């Protein structure tokens, strides 16, 4: 059992590294930062000490060439060392890595060894945009602190509890098994954190609470959580399925792909790009930022109004479907950038759903706050809540719980 209490959380993207250093004795956030445009000539590092010996020193930013992820993590280590919280500290208990896809193999936080790393690498075909960068971050962090446990926390893990009838697609079973085709779900660390925080907000044990969580950012997903256990989620084999998102289409007839190939002459890569990067709000109105969509819709822009209506319509469908799946819903919970900040979205989603026990109090709903809060009227049958997500804290908690046993 370790007596050290700090966890460095790394979220490695293809050209970026987001990080936070937390002391789990609090927990207290000691530092946070971002390295972006890695390998792109002029890189940028933003570092902010939040607690500890360097607290109050202010945000630091520098630009310059950072050629690869090793240089990026070495730069992060230098910033932390300048705060007196460096990677060489004996207080560092673990490094927690966000890994997007764990397949069916990884359903719990896992200490990374050579075999685990090889298996994560083998899952790259299921997450070709994300897992390669996650692997790179792990490799570099292991090289920098080989003596510190590296822990993988998987986006897909929370959804591994879905019953088989919810996880399976209705295609030939042998083909599905051969190519690992099933519904995995994503944003799992957020759904796990928020569903537990919602129960706490309601003052009830997690095991007694059924919640629908709407994680609404540029990527968006819904989950149905019964007693702390995920039973359904909107994303599937990839993050493309489900809700209308910033640039992703969400649900559509699979024959659209065949039609675009046969009639439109588009290649598989072109269709992939269309559905993942040029669809959703962006495809409908030319903007993927909900703030801009709302502004334009308020000014009478018809394409923005259509985009907003399509976005809300899909959300309503999922809220209704997940109410049926759960049978009883205690709370509808909004989280992530759009969910936490766009009161118009929350209002529009529950409008007309009084029959499901859903309503918001306009004054409570309009309040902006970093704190979890209920925005439904007093005595409402189903609470409508806003719970800011904290994926980094969730990753740190899971990593620390594993190494502190």
Image (cartoon, helix red, strand yellow):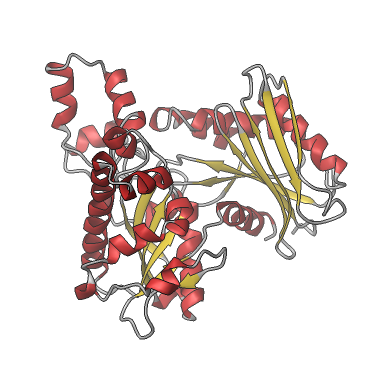
- Work out which quarter of the rendered image holds the N terminus and state it: bottom right
Residue 362 lies left or right of residue 200; in this view the side is: left
Quarter of the image holding residue 16? top right
Quarter of the image holding residue 11? top right
Q: Is residue 174 visible?
A: yes
- Residue 168 is situated, as x and y percent measured from the top left of the image, at 24, 46
- Residue 334 is situated, as x and y percent measured from the top left of the image, at 41, 61
The residue closer to the viewer here, 230 or 15, is 15
404 w.r.t. 274: above or below: below
Q: Is residue 185 visible?
A: no
Q: Which residue ends up furthest to the bottom in the rendered image?
A: 379
- Residue 143 is situated, as x and y percent measured from the top left of the image, at 73, 30
The residue closer to the viewer here, 89 or 390, is 390
Residue found at x 37% / y 80%: 377
- Work out which quarter of the rendered image holds the C terminus and state it: bottom right
Residue found at x 33% / y 64%: 347
The residue closer to the viewer here, 61 or 330, is 61
Q: Total marks drawn? A: 0
- Residue 81 is situated, as x and y percent measured from the top left of the image, at 85, 41
Residue 25 lies left or right of residue 101; in this view the side is: right
Residue found at x 85% / y 50%: 54
Quarter of the image holding residue 353? bottom left
Residue found at x 29% / y 61%: 349
């Amino acid at each position: 059992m370790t007596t050290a209490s700090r966890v460095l959380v790394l979220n490695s993207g293809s050209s970026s590294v987001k990080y936070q250093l937390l002391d789990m004795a609090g927990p207290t956030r000691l530092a946070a930062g971002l390295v972006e445009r890695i390998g792109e000539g002029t890189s940028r590092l933003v570092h902010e000490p939040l607690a500890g010996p360097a607290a109050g020193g202010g945000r630091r930013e520098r630009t310059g060439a950072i050629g690869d992820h090793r240089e990026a993590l070495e730069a992060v280590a230098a910033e932390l060392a300048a705060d007196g919280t460096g990677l060489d500290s004996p207080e560092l208990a673990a490094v927690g890595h966000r890994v997007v896809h764990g397949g069916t193999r990884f359903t719990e936080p896992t200490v990374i060894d050579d075999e685990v790393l090889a298996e994560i690498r083998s899952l790259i075909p299921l997450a070709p945009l994300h897992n390669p960068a996650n692997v790179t971050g792990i490799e570099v962090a292991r090289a920098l602190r080989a003596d510190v446990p590296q822990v993988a926390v998987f986006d897909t893990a929370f959804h591994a509890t879905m019953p088989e009838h919810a996880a399976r697609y209705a295609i030939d079973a042998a083909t599905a098994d051969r190519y690992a085709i099933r519904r995995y779900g994503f944003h799992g660390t957020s759904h796990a954190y928020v569903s537990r925080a919602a129960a706490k907000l309601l003052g009830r044990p997690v095991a007694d609470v059924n919640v629908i969580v709407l994680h609404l950012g540029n990527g968006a997903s819904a989950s149905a959580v019964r007693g702390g256990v995920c039973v359904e989620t909107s994303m599937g084999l990839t993050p493309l399925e489900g809700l209308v998102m910033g640039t992703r289409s969400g649900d559509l007839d699979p024959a659209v792909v065949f039609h675009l190939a046969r009639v439109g002459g588009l290649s598989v890569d072109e269709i992939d790009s269309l559905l993942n990067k040029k669809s959703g709000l962006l495809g409908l109105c030319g903007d993927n930022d909900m703030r801009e969509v709302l502004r334009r819709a308020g000014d009478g822009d018809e394409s923005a109004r259509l985009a907003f209506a399509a976005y809300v319509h899909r959300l309503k469908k999922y809220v209704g479907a997940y109410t049926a799946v759960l049978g009883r819903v205690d709370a509808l919970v909004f989280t992530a950038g759009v969910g936490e900040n766009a009161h118009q979205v929350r209002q529009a989603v529950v409008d007309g759903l009084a029959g499901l026990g859903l309503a918001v109090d306009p004054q409570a709903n309009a309040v902006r706050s970093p704190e979890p809060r209920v925005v439904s009227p007093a005595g409402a049958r189903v609470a409508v809540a806003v719970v800011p997500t904290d994926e980094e804290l969730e990753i740190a908690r899971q990593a620390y719980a594993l190494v502190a046993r």
